[in-house]
Image (cartoon, rainbow, N blue to C red):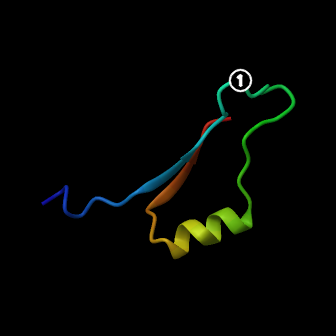
Amino acid sequence: EAVRDARAVLCKGPKTGQIREIDLPTIGPDTLRAAHAAGLAGVVIKA
């Protein structure tokens, strides 16, 4: 039953080779609106 009720989560993090000191992954209002419209359970960001 728990698997049936599971919902997807958007996980965002740095790309391979991305220089984190000058180019961190970000999310903005459009990302959050799109995640909500897609029915995602949440958004996680690794910065």
Across and down, in percent, residue 39 comes to 45, 71
- Which residue occupies 77% across, 36% down? 24
Q: Quadrant of residue 34?
A: bottom right
Question: Where's residue 26, x and y in %?
Answer: 73, 47
Disc 1 target residue: 17
The residue that appears at 71% across and 54% down in the rendered structure is: 27
The amino acid sitting under disc 1 is Gly
Residue 47 vertical position relative to residue 11 in the rendered view, above or below: above
* Count of numbered labels shown in the rendering: 1
Residue 17 falls in image quadrant:
top right
Q: Is residue 34 above or below residue 9?
A: below
Give me the residue at 49% from left, 71% from top.
38
Picture quarter containing residue 5? bottom left
The reply, left or right, for residue 8 in relation to residue 30 is left
Secondary structure under badge 1? loop
The vertical placement of 16 against 27, above or below, is above
* Residue drawn where x is 18% and y is 57% of the image: 2
Residue 8: x percent and y percent? 40, 57
Reply above or below: 35 against 44: below
* Picture quarter with the N terminus: bottom left
Mark 1 crowd level (few <14, some 14–19, many ≥20, 10 Å Cα): few
Furthest residue in direction front, as rendered: 17
Q: Is residue 47 left or right of residue 21?
A: left
Position of residue 31 measured from the top left corner of the image (x, y, whole percent)? 66, 63
Quadrant showing the C terminus: top right
